[in-house]
């Protein structure tokens, strides 16, 4: 079994970098998640956070 948090479907990639913008799916103010069978996983993805203009300096590989 695997715990999966759901995100919005891909739309068009952003024109300036070619990456897709997604967001978490929410229901009643909470993240939409499921427990699914591992055999139902078709592929994995790497997600990059939207930092804004500056990444907080207190973020390190050991704190995030």
Image (cartoon, rainbow, N blue to C red):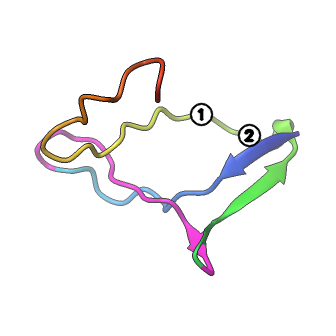
Q: Residue at x 53, y 57 (%)?
A: 7
The answer to whether residue 31 is left or right of residue 41 is left
Total marks placed: 2
Q: Is residue 4 above or below residue 6?
A: above
Crowd band around label 2 with a 10 angstrom C-alpha radius: few (<14), some (14–19), many (20+): few
Q: Mark 1 points at which residue?
A: 44
Q: Which picture quadrant has residue 16?
A: top left
Q: What stretch is highlighted in magenta?
A: 15-28
Q: Which residue is drawn at 33% across and 48% down?
A: 20
Q: Residue at x 55, y 66 (%)?
A: 25
Q: Residue at x 35, y 41 (%)?
A: 49
The answer to whether residue 27 is magenta is: yes
Check contact, mark 1 vs mark 2: CB within 8 A: yes
Q: Name the residue under label 2.
A: 41
Where is residue 48 drawn, in percent x and y?
Answer: 37, 37
Crowd band around label 1 with a 10 angstrom C-alpha radius: few (<14), some (14–19), many (20+): few
The answer to whether residue 16 is left or right of residue 47 is left
- Residue at the far front in the pictured view: 58
Where is residue 23 drawn, in percent x and y?
Answer: 43, 59
The answer to whether residue 38 is left or right of residue 8 is right
Tag 1 secondary structure: loop
Tag 2 secondary structure: loop
Principal secondary structure, stretch drawn in magenta = loop
Q: In this view, does 34 lie above or below 48?
A: below
The answer to whether residue 32 is left or right of residue 54 is right
Where is residue 8 drawn, in percent x and y?
Answer: 49, 62
């Amino acid at each position: 079994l695997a715990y999966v948090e759901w995100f919005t479907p891909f739309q068009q990639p952003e024109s300036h970098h070619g990456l897709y913008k997604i967001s978490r799916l929410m229901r009643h103010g909470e993240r939409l998640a499921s427990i699914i069978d591992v055999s139902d996983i078709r592929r994995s993805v790497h997600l990059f956070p939207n930092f804004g203009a500056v990444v907080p300096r207190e973020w390190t590989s050991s704190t995030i």
